[in-house]
Image (spheres, rainbow, N blue to C red):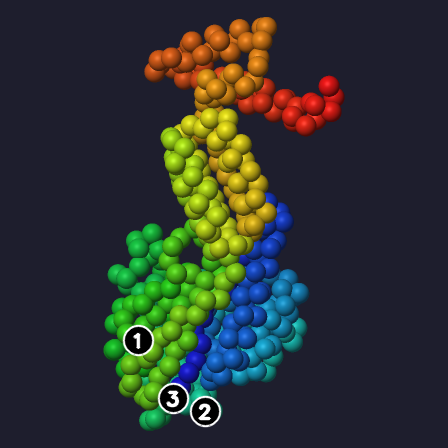
Amino acid sequence: MLRFLHTADWQIGRQYSRFAAEDAAMLADARYVAVERLARLAAEEQVGAVLVAGDIFDAQTLSDRTLHRTFQAMSAYTGPWVMLPGNHDAALAESIWSRAERIGAMPDNVHLLITPEVCVLDDTGMAILPAPLTQRQTHDDLTAWFDSVDTKEGLVRIGLAHGSVEGQLPESADSPNPIAADRASRASLDYLALGDWHGLKQIDARTWYSGTPEQERFKDNGAGQALLVEIDHPGAEPRVIPRAIGQHSWYQWRRSLAVASDLDALLDELGALPAMSVVDLTLSGELDLAGQQRLEQALGAAAGRHRSLQVHLAELALVPTAEDIATLRADGYVGHVISELQQRQEGDDAQADTARQALGILAGLLRDQRPVSGAAEEQS
């Protein structure tokens, strides 16, 4: 039985400019950790090879240090790593791959497939048919040659490609580098390992996208995994087993708060998230002062628990209740202003909305200036 690991789209060197500097650095570093986890999984499962279907690197201009770190992260698995250039790291005449070879970064167990020729791994019983990209974009199906090439009898026939399967991905994902949807059957492949789509996706029984091993977008598409593939013999249908790799899960939520139970539900959701997630949260609606205090405390705790927490509060109004106002004990001119704003907020016109917002801001300021009860008692 042949067993191998299918992965793709490591995107080493990816930048995260939308995040704070500390979070961006840690998210970039997580991609090396993903490679280390892949190597450990391959060693634990004793697979015959690891197939990497393109975009190992995010750009051609990465530093020599980045190249060395990447290949050193693979050290836990000493079997063959079969690597295919994708659109981000295409095998140009002068490319990141030629530089990696020049500086001696690639270990001997890396098989870089930069020409469309069959690669036979004798020890594994595997014949690999690669479709490497030698430029970033092409309108030709580089897997077409798979149909006409013969491989030695008894070898498992594996295709390795990077691109968009025609008619199978969302229109927004369609790009050059097309791949025929029925390539596996037309070329009598036992398995077609694909990269380019960053989510886990099955095209048919023999054709799969593994997705990126470390999620980097707010999409619920199965990213953060690799595929353990088992094939009993040539012609047998593969068994494909997704295995979790990534550290960080990404969540983008929009929640509206109108009543106390809405806040309760939100805090329960936040508490149930796996640690070290990446969270983007937009809140709208209204909160009273007590609710705002609960929210602030919960967000503070969540910020410490997760890799990144970005919260957008522009659409969330602070609307103090009559009880909130009473506890502020505002008198004199400030009390008069509060009373005036309370009267003006009754209604549904623009002036009333402005009065509600102003009242919320003023109440919040007064609350923040109130001494803690224990401190007040000490001063008395």
Indicate left or right for 284 with 309 as reference.
left
| Front position among marks 2 and 1 | 1
Q: Amino acid at mark 1?
A: Arg
Residue 172 seen in this snapshot: yes
Residue 9 percent coordinates (x, y): 46, 64
The residue that label 3 is drawn on is 1
Q: Residue at x 44, y 84 (%)?
A: 119
| Front position among marks 3 and 1 | 3
Rendered position, 377 above or below 166:
above
Q: Mark 3, residues whose alpha carbon is within 10 Å: few (<14), some, or many (≥20)? A: few
Work out whether residue 173 or residue 279 is closer to the camera in this orientation and state it.
279
Disc ID at residue 122:
2
Q: Secondary structure at mark 2?
A: loop
Quadrant in which the N terminus appears: bottom left
Residue 368 sits in which quadrant? top right
Residue 297 percent coordinates (x, y): 55, 38
Q: Residue at x 42, y 10 (%)?
A: 344
Residue at far right of view = 379
Disc ID at residue 206:
1
Of mark 2 and mark 3, the one earlier in the sequence is 3
* Cα distance in 3D space between marks 2 and 3: 14 Å
Residue 148 percent coordinates (x, y): 29, 82
Q: Mark 1, residues whose alpha carbon is within 10 Å: few (<14), some, or many (≥20)? A: many
* Cα distance in 3D space between marks 2 and 1: 22 Å
Indicate left or right for 291 with 172 as reference.
right
Disc ID at residue 321:
none
Residue 225 sits in which quadrant? bottom left
* Cα distance in 3D space between marks 3 and 1: 16 Å
Q: Secondary structure at mark 1?
A: loop
